Amino acid sequence: LKTAPFKLIIAGAPASGKGTQCELIKLKYGVIHLSTGDMLRAAVAAGSEVGKRAKDFMDAGKLVPDEVIIGAVKERLAAPDCVESGWLLDGFPRTPAQAKALADAGIFADCFIFLNVPDDILVERVVGRRTDPVTGKIYHMKFNIPKDKEILARLTQRSDDTEEKIKVRLEQFHSNVASVRGRYADIDIEVDGTKTPEEVSGMIAKSIDAMIFARHCRRHPS
Ligand code: AP5
């Protein structure tokens, strides 16, 4: 099935598994993974203007102001690698203003993947999450412990991954999710994110393939 580069959005609550699934989706569909959380953490670490404006909001578990992130995302999506290979937006759009900014710029996605995970499960995922600073790979101290002792010893924990901060992050998520999702009702794919990562990625791939096939049939009726 010949088709244009894929344009995908993945959404879900904090720690619902977006980053974990993005690793698998980008391998299967060859898209460029753009995580606004990763972009902002890199900006903070580099001490850039965006990083300086974002830092206090991120430390508090709050969303950074729309005007700080919208320009950076639009610029990144226009870069040659994204135009050629397609993209997978992770953590954006997260507010109605961000979704409107994409539409106003003529940027549309093929699928909006929503990972559904209840809040009580998210807290356990957040406090146990660790990241390998060398490879960027995501682990969990209960669900996905690295076998290599060297990797285990160098794992780091995000400063916003505490029980206190996850409450604020969940509030921000719940106050925006319905209006953002509403904009993508025609391309929405809801997946049960409580299953194992492999089961979740299987369900995502099946849904993306079905949606892409349906789009192909609409464009090439025979
Ligand atoms: P961001 O980095 O986007 O954080 P988030 O949305 O809170 O999402 P997470 O990265 O916490 O989780 P995830 O869904 O990727 O889960 P993961 O795969 O790691 O944003 C951070 C901050 O940046 C925001 O608070 C805000 O300040 C700012 N920001 C970012 N984007 C913004 C925007 N657009 N506008 C404004 N501000 C913005 O999984 C979590 C854990 O669970 C891992 O340990 C993993 O191993 C485990 N796990 C994953 N899947 C499973 C499974 N199926 N079963 C069991 N365990 C699993």
Image (cartoon, rainbow, N blue to C red):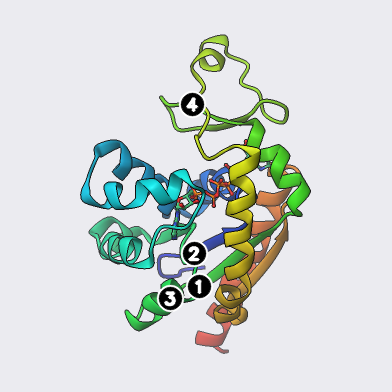
Question: Cα distance, mark 1 to mark 4?
Answer: 31 Å
Q: Which residue type carries mark 1?
A: Asp
Which secondary structure lies at badge 1?
loop
Question: Cα distance, mark 2 to mark 1?
Answer: 6 Å
Left or right, 128 with respect to 135, comes to: right
User: Considering only order in the chain, which callout, 2 or 4, is on the residue closer to the N terminus?
Assistant: 2
- To which residue does mark 2 refer? 8
- To which residue does mark 4 refer? 132
Q: Which residue type carries mark 3?
A: Ala
Question: Cα distance, mark 4 to mark 2?
Answer: 26 Å
- To which residue does mark 3 refer? 97
In contact (CB < 8 Å): disc 4 and disc 3 = no
Q: Which residue type carries mark 4?
A: Asp
- The residue closer to the viewer here, 28 or 140, is 140
Which secondary structure lies at badge 3?
helix
Left or right, 160 with respect to 166, comes to: left
User: Considering only order in the chain, which callout, 1 or 2, is on the residue closer to the N terminus?
Assistant: 2
